[in-house]
Image (tube, helix red, strand yellow):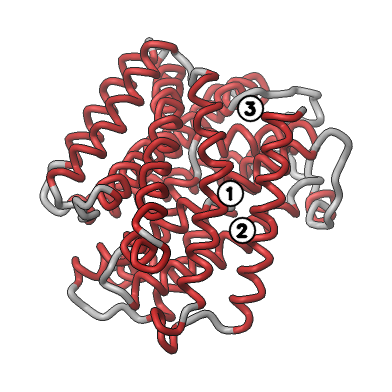
């Protein structure tokens, strides 16, 4: 078990923090609106996510310096600070959505007000921070939550009447009318360069914990395992929506609505299963998203990024508290915060992608562990995808 966690632990944390309530909402809408026809985009988005997560894993194995420190040294302090502050703003902006996901999941299952559970689980998450060796606790919590999600989604799939001939044709690329927005949203959320970026920090935390040299191949296997889990969970929700909701013409606007839609078709138990899965996705993102925001702001400000640092723990707590206050005050993620997060992300993500790519390619930094030809080509294609997403988002937000 120790060896397994040493290999897959960081990758599982990345998968858990990326697969949040927003991902469940997007994938459920894709399946409910377009049946199986958009399954192919899971493979495309996960391919590029795997490439960049593996690059970042390699950087984390080769260097004791954090990725932000390497960026400051290579490209200037200003760029490193801007990336750290930008990630903090994005994480804080989206944190309320994770709290609301937890509140809805438990509130719907118990028929109680969601604000109670937002407060309770935010308090639990903050309490976890101040246990000794927070990384070790977070790794185990994320593993449990991922196993919980996998169990719930597999059980829900087992109850669904899947048309396997249509399912397999869904891996042939097509773009149905009106689906482009969902394709862009899914790719942008699944090909998460912020999640890949933080993989270097997780690898370094794992190295400190074991005080062993982490094998490059093992770190890449762990990265690909986490990405594969992320892909399976995304596909499972989409397939379930395609099998159950599409034939009935039921359209959903959120993951919570999908859980409610399952009840009259499968009964209360299936609906409860889905809400348990939603809780796993929301709570893992609530902890992971705040950890990313707080740790990278700490690194940007010169406090370091160690999860055992009191200053870093305070910054992580700040993200959680702000998210909790917004969630309770508004009962939803305010449009202004969504716009802020999207605006920062549009201009931040290309800088992150280019920084990762250039450092992973640089032989003076990476030595013989620098990108080979395959990673150079695949990474460059990933940057093209990121630029296309950026142009699309700029058009939608400012020109449309």
The quarter of the picture where residue 378 lies is: bottom right
Q: Which residue is mark 3?
A: 266
SS at mark 2? helix
Q: Horizontally, is 87 left or right of 2 in the view?
A: right
Q: Which residue is mark 2?
A: 46
Among numbered discs 1 and 3, the one appearing first in the sequence = 1
Residue 267: image location, x then y, percent: 59, 23
The residue drawn where x is 18% and y is 74% is 211
The image quadrant where one finds the C terminus is top right
- Few, some or many residues within 10 Å of mark 3 (<14, 14–19, 20+): some
The residue drawn where x is 81% and y is 46% is 37
Q: Nearer the viewer, mark 1 or mark 3?
A: 1
Farthest bottom residue? 368
- Few, some or many residues within 10 Å of mark 2 (<14, 14–19, 20+): many
Residue 343: image location, x then y, percent: 56, 34
C-alpha gap between disc 1 and disc 2: 7 Å
SS at mark 1? helix
From the viewer's side, name the closer residue of 321 and 368. Answer: 368
The image quadrant where one finds the N terminus is bottom left
Is label 1 in contact with label 3 (beta carbons under 8 Å)? no
Is label 1 in contact with label 2 (beta carbons under 8 Å)? yes
Q: Which mark is residue 190?
A: 1
Please indicate, yes or no, whether residue 9 appears anywhere in the rendered image. no
Among numbered discs 2 and 3, the one appearing first in the sequence = 2
From the viewer's side, name the closer residue of 217 and 199. Answer: 199
């Amino acid at each position: 078990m120790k060896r397994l966690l040493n290999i897959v632990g960081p990758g599982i944390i990345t998968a858990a923090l990326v697969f949040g309530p927003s991902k469940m909402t997007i994938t459920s809408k894709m399946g409910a609106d377009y049946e199986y026809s958009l399954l192919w985009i899971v493979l495309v988005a996960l391919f590029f996510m795997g490439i960049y997560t593996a690059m970042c894993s390699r950087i984390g194995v080769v260097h004791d310096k954090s990725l932000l420190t390497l960026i400051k040294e290579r490209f200037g302090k200003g760029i490193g600070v801007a990336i750290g502050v930008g990630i903090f703003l994005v994480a804080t902006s989206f944190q309320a959505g994770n709290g609301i996901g937890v509140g809805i999941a438990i509130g719907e299952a118990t028929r109680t007000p969601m604000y109670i559970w937002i407060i309770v689980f935010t308090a639990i998450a903050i309490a976890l921070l101040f246990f000794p060796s927070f990384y070790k606790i977070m790794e185990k919590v994320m593993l449990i939550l991922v196993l919980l999600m996998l169990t719930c989604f597999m059980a829900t799939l087992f109850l669904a009447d899947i048309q396997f001939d249509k399912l397999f044709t869904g891996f042939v690329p097509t773009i149905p009318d009106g689906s482009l927005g969902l394709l862009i949203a899914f790719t942008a959320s699944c090909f998460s360069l912020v999640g890949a970026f933080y993989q270097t920090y997780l690898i370094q935390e794992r190295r400190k914990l074991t005080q062993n040299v982490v094998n490059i191949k093992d770190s890449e296997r762990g990265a690909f395992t986490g990405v594969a889990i992320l892909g399976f969970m995304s596909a499972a929700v989409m397939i379930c929506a395609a099998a159950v909701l599409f034939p009935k013409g039921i359209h959903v606007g959120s993951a919570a609505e999908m859980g409610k839609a399952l009840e009259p078709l499968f009964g209360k138990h299936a609906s409860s299963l889905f809400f348990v899965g939603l809780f796993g996705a929301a709570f893992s993102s609530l902890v992971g998203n705040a950890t990313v925001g707080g740790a990278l702001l700490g690194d940007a400000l010169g406090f370091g990024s160690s999860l055992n640092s009191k200053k870093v723990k305070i910054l992580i707590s700040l993200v959680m508290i702000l998210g909790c206050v917004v969630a309770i005050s508004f009962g939803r993620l305010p449009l202004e915060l969504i716009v802020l997060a999207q605006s920062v992300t549009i201009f931040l993500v290309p800088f992150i992608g280019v920084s990762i790519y250039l450092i992973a390619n640089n032989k003076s930094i990476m030595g013989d562990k620098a990108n080979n030809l395959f990673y150079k080509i695949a990474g460059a294609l990933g940057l093209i995808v990121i630029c296309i997403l950026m142009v699309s988002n700029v058009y939608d937000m400012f020109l449309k």
